[in-house]
Each structure stands twice: as structure tokens, then as C-alpha cells.
Amino acid sequence: MMEQSQFCDTANRIANEGAEGLANGLTNNTTLTELNLCDNRIRFVGVKAIAIAMRSNTTLENLNLRDNWIEDVGARELCDGIKRGRKSFGHLDLSHNFIWAKEKAHLEKELSKMLKKLTV
């Protein structure tokens, strides 16, 4: 049986509860390399759960959280989660959220050395 390396759950309104459930699975995941959760109404609680999972997950390389309801503080939590426990990351997409220009600049600065691509 082939292991899944990508998971896409877009526009299903999983919100914080669904993001928290997926984050629990991410914590010990060793096969998933791409996660697409765009357009799911994920807010701070959900993105914080994902950020915490990212501290121990070293397999995920691409994360798409486009078109959610993530604000500056959630983006910063995610940035911190990605930076802990890894030296590189592929693509992080946070576009079409509620992240202001000042925070975008902060994310770019904080992740520039380890991130291959950032979309905000």
C-alpha cells in the first residue's frame, strides 16, 4: 500500500476544530509532505494547534493556509512553530488572510534563511 504524501481539504469549513484534529495527526506524522487547508475558516486557535504540531513534525515541507481567517498573531505563532526543530521548509502560503504589511515584513525576515517560498 502506498503512503499518502499529500492531503488536500479545501473549502470544507473545517475551522478551528478541524485544524486542531489535523494538527494532532501532524505531530507524529512521518509521511505527509504537503498539506493544503485553504479556504477553511481557520482562525487563531486552529493555526496555533498547527504551529505546535510543526515543532515536532519535520516531514511536512509545503503548507497552504490561503484564504483563511488568520491574523498577525496567528501568523507569528506559525512562524515560530516552523522555525523550531527544522533548518528548512519549502513553501508557506498565507495569502488572502488578515495579515498586515508590517507582519508580512516580519515573517519574510524571520523565515528568509530557511524558507524556499513564502506567499503572504
Image: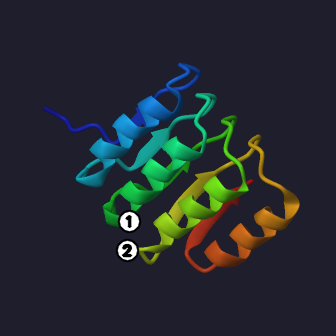
The mark that comes first in sequence, 1 or 2, is 1
Q: What residue type is labelled 1?
A: Arg
Compared with 90, 21 (above or below) is above
| SS state under label 2 | loop
Compared with 117, 25 (above or below) is above
Picture residue at 37% right of the left edge, 55% below the top:
53
Q: Is residue 42 left or right of residue 4?
A: right
**The image quarter in which residue 98 lies:** top right
Picture residue at 66% right of the left edge, 58% below the top:
73
Picture residue at 49% right of the left edge, 73% below the top:
83
Pick the residue in front: 36 or 5: 36
* Tally of marks: 2
Mark linked to residue 85: 2
Q: What residue type is labelled 2?
A: Gly
Q: Could you tell me residue 95's position as x and y percent?
A: 73, 46
Q: Is residue 60 left or right of residue 56?
A: right
Dot 1, crowdedness within 10 Å: few (<14), some or many (≥20)? some
| SS state under label 1 | helix
As drawn, the residue found furthest toward the right would be: 101
Dot 2, crowdedness within 10 Å: few (<14), some or many (≥20)? few
Mark 1 lies on residue: 55
As drawn, the residue found furthest toward the top would be: 12
Q: Could you tell me residue 75's position as x and y percent?
A: 64, 57
Q: Contact (CB < 8 A) between labels 1 and 2? A: yes
Q: In this view, does 113 lie to the left or right of 45?
A: right
**Spatial distance from mark 1 to mark 2, Cα to Cα?**
6 Å
